[in-house]
Image (spheres, rainbow, N blue to C red):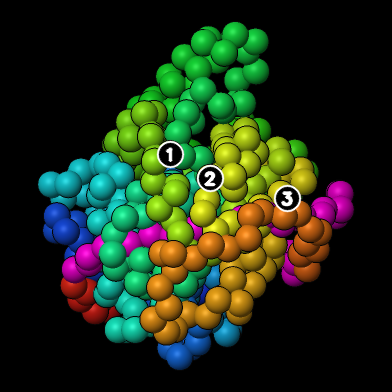
């Protein structure tokens, strides 16, 4: 089983989990899962995005785990989860893995806030009709993501022709070319494609090391799924309170995706726009992301049997949100405000968990 990439010291180093599990998904795929924080605290489940791993969540995990039960897992093929089983790469497989993790880690009657970044948020959408998530999700967070038309709306290559721009984005997204070692050139590319212009070098390097650690075959396998992603019909099934987060400088999933999600969600608690940030919002401003998750956990709770499928929450409004990040070094170059507006849900069966030694 692969080990996570080496990371610099400081807030980006993943904390030591209280417990580790190998969760077995519906097709036999083995999913590396970690449990952090007090067992009886409000529960949170974090799902990372394409070519990332549990290490991606380290700063958010550090902000939450002192007073939350935080569950993180490596998507199939990523991090310490080996290559997928017969189910391969699909949105169905993403949903299967998520419900397996939820079923294996949450005791009966326990509910959690489910938060996903990029492909992790797409995982929540894919699982929207699964009964187990409808029962176990107290609230949800869709961070830096979209439901469809990813290559059409991306802004990585600034071509005037929409058709040409989409064609180039499709070629780049589906490329099987090796990323190679982390170099000054690759760091500049990572910053340009995935982060805001004011991101500090340490954060860029962490992101690059995580991205470069993903196996090429896994990167290409999930790229094929993302190229033709079509989850718009699932958004309306996310009926639990759901928040949406986006960086205003996100080139991969620009704010128009977030606004479309906020408008389509049945119970949107708010849309948080983080000025000047790119696609990697949980790394760029972990306190802001953790603050949204913490707010949902505090307001909606994580236990009880309330049926949210008929909830008719208020439509999105806008208000100021001021994150108080301990990662102040990442914001010295410019001040940031955030604007709140959104909400989500999910659901279905799971499988078994086997305790593993660290």
Instruction: Please tell me which residue is depicted at 51% across the width and 40% down the height of the picture.
Output: 146
Residue tagged 1: 232
Q: Is residue 76 left or right of residue 137?
A: left
Q: Residue furthest bottom?
A: 40
Q: Name which quarter of the figure residue 25 lies in.
A: bottom left
Q: Earlier in the sequence, mark 2 or mark 3?
A: 2
Q: Earlier in the sequence, mark 1 or mark 2?
A: 1
Magenta residue span:
325-351
Does 83 sit above or below residue 158?
A: below
Q: Residues within 10 Å of mark 3 (few under 14, many from 20)?
A: many
Task: Based on the picture, tell me whether residue 333 belongs to the magenta stretch.
Answer: yes
Residue tagged 2: 264
Q: Earlier in the sequence, mark 1 or mark 3?
A: 1
Instruction: Please tell me which residue is depicted at 47% across the width and 28% down the height of the picture.
Output: 149
> Which of the two discs, 1 and 3, sits closer to the camera?
1
What is the CA distance from the residue labelled 1 to the residue labelled 2? 9 Å
Circle 3 — which element? strand
Does 6 sit above or below residue 161?
A: below
Q: Position of residue 238 (x, y in %)?
A: 44, 56
Q: Name which quarter of the figure residue 242 lies in.
A: bottom right
Q: Name which quarter of the figure residue 232 lies in.
A: top left
Residue tagged 3: 274
């Amino acid at each position: 089983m692969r080990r996570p990439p080496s990371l610099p010291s400081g807030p980006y180093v993943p904390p030591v989990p209280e417990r580790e599990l190998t969760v077995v998904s519906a097709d036999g795929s083995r999913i590396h899962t970690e449990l952090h924080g007090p067992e009886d605290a409000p529960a949170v489940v974090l799902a990372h995005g394409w070519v990332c791993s549990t290490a991606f969540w380290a700063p958010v995990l550090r902000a939450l785990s002192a007073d939350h039960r935080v569950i993180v897992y490596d998507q199939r093929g990523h991090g310490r989860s080996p290559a997928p089983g017969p189910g391969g790469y699909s949105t169905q497989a993403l949903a299967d893995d998520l419900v397996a993790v939820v079923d294996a880690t949450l005791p009966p009657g326990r509910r959690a806030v489910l938060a996903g970044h990029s492909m992790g948020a797409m995982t929540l959408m894919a699982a929207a009709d699964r009964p187990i998530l409808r029962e176990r999700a107290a609230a949800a967070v869709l961070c830096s993501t979209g439901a469809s038309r990813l290559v059409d709306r991306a802004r990585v290559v600034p071509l005037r022709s929409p058709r040409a721009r989409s064609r180039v984005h499709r070629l780049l997204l589906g490329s099987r070319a090796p990323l190679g070692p982390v170099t000054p050139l690759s760091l500049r590319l990572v910053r340009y494609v995935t982060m805001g212009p004011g991101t500090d070098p340490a954060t860029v390097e962490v992101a690059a090391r995580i991205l470069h650690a993903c196996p090429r075959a896994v990167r290409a396998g999930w790229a094929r799924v993302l190229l033709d992603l079509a989850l718009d019909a699932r958004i309306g099934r996310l009926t639990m309170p759901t928040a949406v987060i986006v960086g205003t400088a996100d080139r991969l999933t620009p704010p128009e995706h977030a606004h479309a999600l906020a408008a389509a969600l049945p119970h949107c608690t708010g849309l948080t726009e983080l000025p000047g940030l790119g696609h990697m919002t949980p790394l760029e401003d972990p306190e802001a992301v953790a603050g949204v998750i913490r707010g949902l956990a505090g307001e909606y709770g994580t236990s009880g049997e309330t049926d949210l499928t008929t909830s008719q929450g208020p439509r999105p409004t806008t208000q100021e949100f001021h994150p108080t990040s301990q990662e102040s070094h990442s914001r010295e170059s410019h001040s940031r405000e955030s604007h709140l507006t959104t909400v989500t849900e999910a659901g279905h069966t799971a499988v078994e968990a086997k305790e593993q030694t660290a």
